Amino acid sequence: MLGKVKQWLGIEGVKLELLLPPDFSPKMGSLAGRIRLSSKHPQTVTAVKIVMVEKYSRGKDEDQLVDEYELGRQVITDTIPVPGEGVPVELNFRIAFSPLPSPMDEFGNRNPLFGGLAWAAKRLRGVNSEFRIEAEAQVQGVGLNPFDKQVLSQ
């Protein structure tokens, strides 16, 4: 009985770990990485969803506004057996994404003079973009799916 509850909750089940390159630039257009799956007991992963998200913040303190945008998504629908005993299984992936330019960025891209003005305005308003990758695996017979997320360093 306890074993079935543990399995349904994902305890001692599949663990998911994102392995990403140390360098990232939003201008890259795609990002390659790996997903490492491991488990104490044999399990079957039916799908893996990978999403790239941009967290765009501007303003300071209580006037701060934060928006999140999904820039790219990839779903791997292969059936992946995870053998158990902690033996890892690795999947390679490449997620394509399209960065969303802000109105300030569009203004700055018109010419070099406007680029300097846009840079100064962004610094003055405290504009910041943070990019992250989120991955979630669908595991057969489990209610709570394993996931991982990592912030990409620019």
Image (cartoon, helix red, strand yellow):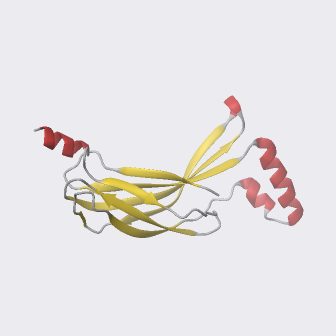
Say which residue appears at 43% left-offset and 69% top-offset.
93
**Compared to 95, does 105 lie above or below?**
above
Image check: 33 left or right of 29?
left
Residue 29 horizontal/vertical position (percent): 59, 69
Image quadrant occupied by the C terminus: bottom right
Residue 48 horizontal/vertical position (percent): 35, 61
Say which residue appears at 75% left-offset and 60% top-offset.
106
Closer to the camera, 68 or 87? 87
Residue 79: quadrant of the picture = bottom left
Say which residue appears at 22% left-offset and 57% top-offset.
85
**Compared to 10, does 60 lie above or below?**
above
Residue 50 horizontal/vertical position (percent): 43, 60
Closer to the camera, 124 or 69? 124
**Compared to 126, does 88 lie above or below?**
below
* View extreme (right): residue: 113
Residue 9: quadrant of the picture = top left
Say which residue appears at 46% left-offset and 51% top-offset.
149
Closer to the camera, 117 or 103? 117
Residue 3 horizontal/vertical position (percent): 14, 42
Residue 126: quadrant of the picture = top right
Image quadrant occupied by the N terminus: top left
**Compared to 64, does 95 lie above or below?**
below
Image check: 94 left or right of 56?
left
